[in-house]
Amino acid sequence: MTLRHRDGQVFRFDAGALCLELLLTGGPGPVASQYEVLDRTEGLLDWVRDCRLAPGLAPVVTAAELTAVRATRDALWRLALARAGGEPLPAADLAVLNAAAAHAPLVATVAADGTRAWAPGATGTGLLATVARDAVDLLTGPYADRIRVCGADDCALLFADTSRPGRRRWCSMDRCGNRHKVRAHRARTPTEGEK
């Protein structure tokens, strides 16, 4: 996904999983006040257009479904942070995630031109079930122990490290990784007055 930081910098971010992309819509605590977009249906639909789901998805989302997406997103934040920190997964948040995953997911189809399309009748509940099932796969799959918080002190983005060596530290080398390299270079290089 392409993200725009509040300082105006635009950078690419690969969360490694659909469910972690949903965290970009806001979240519990201080994240909500800065980044919340699920306070309106349009915010969710904007996320749908930008996320890794195939183009053309336009679910009909009710107010109750939007509330459920937000509650599940907040539970997923806490679950991903717990997994990243090596802590037990909160039971209440697991219950929220599992309830969302129990519904029928979106149905993908193949269009006449060979591209991925979506079956008619997509709903917010189907969208949430699709995201929740992705979260179940992530939390129980081979990358469960590779859920990480960006290594920058001032960044809270979560990602699944799907790289082969499993040593990813930054949300994006274009942003946090590059800033770290610049700081490290400046620390190693004497300034004109020090020479």
Image (cartoon, rainbow, N blue to C red):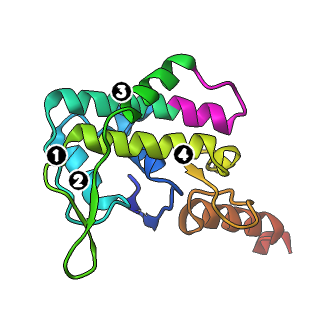
User: On residue 137, which mark appears?
Assistant: 4
- What residue span does the magenta drawing correspond to? 78-90
Look at discs 4 and 2 and give the one toward the viewer: 4
Q: What residue would you read off at disc 2?
A: 46
Residues under numbered marks 4 and 2 in contact, where contact means CB atoms less than 8 Å apart: no
Q: Quadrant of the N terminus?
A: bottom left
- Badge number at residue 71: 3
Q: Residue furthest top?
A: 92
* In contact (CB < 8 Å): disc 1 and disc 2: yes
Circle 2 — which element?
helix
CB atoms of marks 3 and 1 within 8 Å: no
Residue 42 is labelled as 1
The reply, left or right, for residue 14 in relation to residue 6 is: right
| Label 4 to label 3: alpha-carbon separation | 19 Å
Query: If you read the primary sequence from the N terminus, does the residue marked by circle 4 or circle 2 appear first?
Result: 2
Which residue: 20% across, 64% down?
Answer: 56
The amino acid on which the numbered mark 1 sits, given as a three-letter code, is Glu
